[in-house]
């Protein structure tokens, strides 16, 4: 029996009925919260997992986050084909998923399917890739928000590093992603923003390597054949293409050039293998682009389903890594 001053009464035990009601209510609330989180099915339309280390890490981050958050992830991979990806989004709508996450292979061609999603009241969250909608659809709220890296900043950061390293004098070859993909467009613009400030820096050739090491290797072989020792640097729009560039330079015994020494190489992404090549000084600089978007994007989608709204754009923070800080950073890299 607890101690009690003369004026106070011992605490009243809840009546049996109130206790049962309380328990039932707690159970109900718990079940509702569990059922709500558990029953969400979110469709993730990925562009092309096989293309690069970045995208493999990106897909994996969605799978892990879905498990952790207790949601069902309906996953479809377009294999780098926009028409396939459009159909897959349509299938998600027919399947009546609760929300759709889209990492668009290319920026154009999404109006009609996003209008359908809106009509079906299925919220769409854009992950990493931005879109270009027709002017008449731009204010219709066809997607809730976009979460990813600032691709234009990445291009500028690559250009600024190169301008500093070469004191503003360099003949550059550029290996791009697919022409209609958001990162290719924006990284290209950002890089040119900086180039335009330095009359001694010239982009002497540009070609797509489609995010892939093997295709970039072929492009670089051709550049070496056409331009040879006239090339001062390569701007590769992603790490995997930078790997292909390293291979092409090393395999060209005729020119006998060394990647990272005779030809500077700047990439974008900052995957583990990229860091290893930075440490080996075969690549000179990498602009980070964080692929670990799964948890934040899926959490946002869940919140949206709970009625919350978000700003139209949300940026990830990215850094620049060079041969000077790569070794220290490598052990803690997560992708
Ligand atoms: O959208 C991010 C870009 O897409 C990454 O740089 C690239 O590796 C991927 O394909």
Image (cartoon, rainbow, N blue to C red):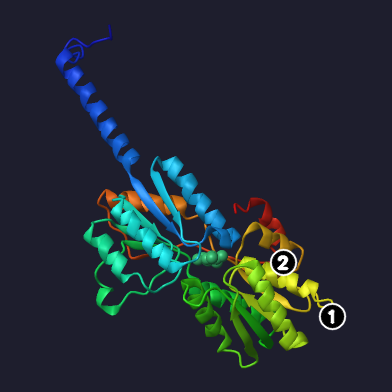
Look at the image and tell me whether residue 8 can be seen. no
Which residue position is annotated with label 2? 323
- Percent x, y for residue 278? 71, 65
- Pointer 2 or 1: first along the chain: 1
Which residue position is annotated with label 1? 254
- Percent x, y for residue 201? 64, 88
Residue found farthest to the bottom: 199
Please report the residue visible at 54 percent of the width from the left and 59 percent of the height from the top: 55
Q: Residues within 10 Å of mark 1 (few under 14, many from 20)?
A: few
Classify the position of the C terminus by image quarter.
bottom right
Q: Is residue 187 left or right of residue 19?
A: right
Q: Is residue 120 left or right of residue 100?
A: left
Please report the residue visible at 57 percent of the width from the left and 63 percent of the height from the top: 51
Q: Nearer the viewer, residue 223 or 4?
A: 223
Classify the position of the N terminus by image quarter.
top left
Q: Nearer the viewer, residue 92 or 314?
A: 92
Q: Is residue 312 left or right of residue 75?
A: left
Please report the residue visible at 24 percent of the width from the left and 10 percent of the height from the top: 4
SS of the residue at dot 1? loop
Rendered view: 183 above or below 30: below
Look at the image and tell me whether residue 112 can be seen. yes
Q: Distance from label 2 to label 1 (Cα)?
A: 27 Å
Q: Residues within 10 Å of mark 2 (few under 14, many from 20)?
A: many
Answer with the quarter of the image where residue 194 lies: bottom right
Q: Is residue 277 left or right of residue 315?
A: right
- Percent x, y for residue 35? 30, 36
Which label belongs to residue 223?
none
Q: Nearer the viewer, residue 93 or 136?
A: 93
Which of the two discs, 2 and 1, sits closer to the camera?
A: 1
- Percent x, y for residue 326? 69, 61
Rendered view: 29 above or below 169: above
Q: Nearer the viewer, residue 225 or 154?
A: 225
């Amino acid at each position: 029996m607890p101690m009690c001053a003369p004026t106070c009464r011992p605490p009243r035990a809840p009546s049996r009925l109130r206790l049962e009601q309380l328990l039932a209510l707690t159970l109900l609330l718990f079940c509702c919260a569990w059922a709500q989180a558990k029953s969400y099915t979110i469709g993730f339309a990925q562009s092309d997992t096989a293309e690069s280390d970045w995208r493999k890490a990106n897909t994996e981050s969605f799978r892990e986050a879905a498990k952790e958050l207790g949601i069902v992830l309906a996953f479809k991979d377009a294999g780098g084909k926009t028409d396939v990806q459009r159909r897959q989004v349509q299938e998600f709508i027919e399947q009546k998923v609760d929300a759709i996450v889209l990492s668009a292979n290319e920026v154009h061609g999404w109006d009609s399917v996003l209008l359908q999603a809106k009509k079906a009241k299925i919220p769409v969250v854009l992950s990493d890739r931005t879109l270009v909608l027709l002017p008449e659809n731009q204010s219709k709220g066809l997607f809730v928000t976009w979460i990813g890296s600032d691709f234009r900043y990445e291009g500028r950061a690559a250009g600024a590093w190169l301008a500093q390293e070469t004191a503003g004098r360099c003949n550059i070859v550029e290996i791009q992603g697919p022409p209609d993909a958001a990162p290719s467009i924006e990284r290209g613009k950002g890089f040119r923003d900086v180039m335009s400030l330095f009359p001694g820096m010239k982009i002497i050739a540009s070609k797509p390597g489609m995010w892939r090491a093997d295709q970039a290797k072929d492009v670089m072989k051709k550049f070496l054949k056409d331009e040879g020792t006239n090339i001062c640097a390569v701007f590769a729009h992603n790490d995997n293409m930078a790997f292909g560039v390293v291979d092409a330079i090393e395999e060209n015994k005729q020119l006998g050039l060394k990647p990272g020494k005779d030809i500077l190489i700047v990439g974008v992404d900052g995957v583990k293998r990229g860091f290893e090549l930075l440490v080996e000084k075969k690549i000179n600089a990498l602009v980070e682009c964080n692929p670990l978007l799964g948890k934040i994007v899926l959490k946002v989608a869940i919140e949206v389903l709970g009625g919350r709204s978000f700003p139209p754009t949300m940026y990830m923070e990215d850094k620049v890594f060079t041969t000077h800080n790569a070794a220290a950073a490598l052990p803690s890299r997560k992708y």
